[in-house]
Image: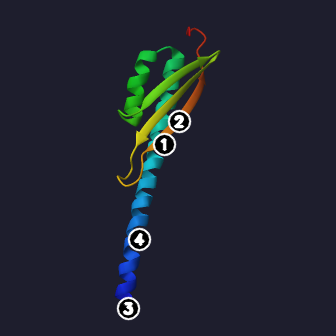
Amino acid sequence: MVTAETAVVLPVLVLLALTGVAAIGVAQARIRCADAASASARVIARGDAAEADALAHRAAGPAVRITTVRDGTDTTVTARLRLRPLRWIGAVTITETATVATEPQVQP
């Protein structure tokens, strides 16, 4: 009797474990994406826009894409990272935004 219940419950436990591992991977990717957005925003606000892409790729990997918007005295950087934690789960797009004050000597 115990063997039958174990045979039914074991696949469910494996599925829960895989889902937990995927959730941890997504959480780590969100942190990396937020780091990439904030680091790139600081660099762009200082006027070193050429270095921003390399810094974002170093922080979040080569798949990260950043977009920049300068609005008055603020610089806003949005980092997007598309990942697929498990093959049988659809792709997840992570978006993080950072806004910093633009340095006064930097021209838009």
From mark 1 to mark 2, how far is it between C-alphas?
A: 7 Å
- The spot of residue 90 in percent (x, y) is 42, 49
- Considering only order in the chain, which callout, 4 or 1, is on the residue closer to the N terminus? 4
Which residue in the protein does label 2 denote? 96
When the figure is inspected, residue 105 is found, relative to residue 79, above or below; the finding is above
Which residue in the protein does label 1 denote? 30
Q: In the figure, is residue 13 to the left or right of 45?
A: left
Residue type at tag 3: Met
From mark 4 to mark 2, how far is it between C-alphas?
A: 32 Å
- The spot of residue 30 in percent (x, y) is 48, 42
Residue type at tag 2: Glu
Please report the residue visible at 38 percent of the width from the left and 24 percent of the height from the top. 54
- Considering only order in the chain, which callout, 3 or 4, is on the residue closer to the N terminus? 3
Which residue in the protein does label 4 denote? 13
Which residue in the protein does label 3 denote? 1
- Dividing the image into 4 quarters, which one contains the C terminus? top right
Element type at mark 2: strand
Within-10-Å neighbours for mark 3: few <14, some 14–19, many 20+: few
- The spot of residue 51 in percent (x, y) is 41, 19
Please report the residue visible at 39 percent of the width from the left and 50 percent of the height from the top. 85
